[in-house]
Image (cartoon, rainbow, N blue to C red):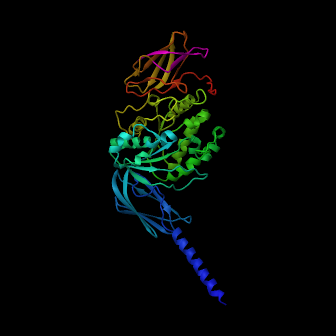
Amino acid sequence: MKRTPIVFSTCLLLAGLLFTGFETAAQLRLPAILSSGMVLQQNESVTFWGWAGPSEKVYVTTSWNNRTDSAVVSNMATWKLKVMTPGAGGPFTITIKSRNTITLSDVMVGEVWVCSGQSNMEWSYYNGTSDIAPDFPSANNKNIRLFHVPKTAAVYPQDDVKASWTACDSNTIKSFSSVGYFFGKKLQQELNVPIGIINASWGGTPAETWTPEETIKQDPLLSSAAIQLNSFPWWPSAPGQAYNGMIAPLANFSIAGAIWYQGEGNTTNNSSYHQLFTRMIDSWRQAWGKLLPFYYVQIAPFKYGRTNEGALLQEQQTLTMTHPKTGMVVVSDLIDSVTNIHPSRKKPVAERLANWALADTYGQTGINYKSPVLISATREKDKMILRFSNAPGGLQINGNEAAGLYVSGDQEEWFPAKARVKNDVMTVWSPLVKQPRHVRYGFGNTVVGNISSSEGLPIVPFRTDNWKVAQDPIN
């Protein structure tokens, strides 16, 4: 008879615990990227979303217009609504209310960019970038906000990340992407609006892991190429895993565009990179529901393990310039050594990316931001005549004579070539080739050219032939 009260009390206790757990689970919650100190994309219908008790109502009030928008929580305990942002400004306050209330303070409105890729995008002061320390005394800038996504791989798309927004200062930039910081700094200076930079990068990762798995599976070429990737203990290589953990959780958050520095992780399966990269770009654009501007860095010369594998990857990146709303930065003139896969100077790389954004996305004029590109090659007697676009002030040879330039006749034998330039025309020849047929410039893992536009932008490496290129192991 004495057991009954105990059983009854235990049941009450369990019921109370269950109810308390339900109450906790039903609390209004937001993803980490929607937090105090964030930057929202200006003049856009941005998404607010999160979790709360099913069938409850969530109210979002913004201080820039004191308007309240609302949404009903679904039976999956999720909610989502759109809010129109004003032009650049702040700080603002946003109140989200349901069973409990969350107040977001110090919210800025401006331009938001994602920076992603592998180690050259990830590289920070702590990794040895050489040109960021001089910025420490003047780095404090509350109009630049940083959001660092931790390295996270997942088999399925995730809905949140463990990170927080921080204001730019001499401490926060030390562990942040140097390319991302310098990119944001130049945009902030030129546009004079708050800038949000979201860094989602992971050294060593191939582009397959940043592409949704279904996109890879549906393409036989990409599926076959993905199998060729080596597995390493330091980063994921399976399709979609970095995308699921680091990009999918961001896709509801409105951004202006993306910058990308990657490719070294795909030199072993380089022949499919153009197709892979364009599919990846399109999958991101589909996730964000807009034609995101996408500006990227061509990989630098480096002593890879097989001949020409880096050059062929560069060639694939060049092909991607034909994809809508993309732009490529060439950095062959910014390397320290062809034995260092991580060139230490990140500021000029970032500023070239920023110039693409300023001119192409924001419509600023008077910016020379495109590297010269070969548009035609014809033979005149014993010389090749090459013409280039994107050289408004003409071409220049930076040194006593051209470097990285080769010419061949019909026999596929390549000889160092000489060149002279006038305006946007380059004349190429070799005394060893009486009837030249093809020209290569900057083509090879460690071949570094020295020809640029008069504005200082290196010409895009090229070859005029389509001959099969050897990729033999280097002893």
In which quadrant is the C terminus drawn?
A: top right
**Magenta highlight on residue 419:** yes
Q: Position of residue 150 (x, y in %)?
A: 51, 50
Q: Up-down: is 357 above or below 50?
A: above
Relative vertical location of residue 464 with respect to residue 171 in this rendering, above or below: above
Q: Is residue 130 or residue 279 the one in the foreground?
A: 130
Q: Position of residue 160 (x, y in %)?
A: 52, 56
Residue 92 on the magenta segment:
no
Please state which of residues 326 and 315 is positioned toward the viewer in this rendering.
315
x%, y% of residue 379? 51, 14
Q: Specify whether residue 352 is in view.
A: yes
In the picture shown, does residue 218 fall above or below 438? below
Measuring 44% from the left and 22% from the top, which residue is drawn there? 451
* Magenta extent: 402-421
Give the camera-side residue of 161 and 257. 161
Image quarter where the N terminus lies is bottom right
| Residue 54 in view, yes or no | no
Which quarter of the figure has residue 192?
top left
Location of residue 180 with respect to 71 vertically, above or below? above
Q: Could you tell me residue 418's position as x and y percent? A: 47, 14
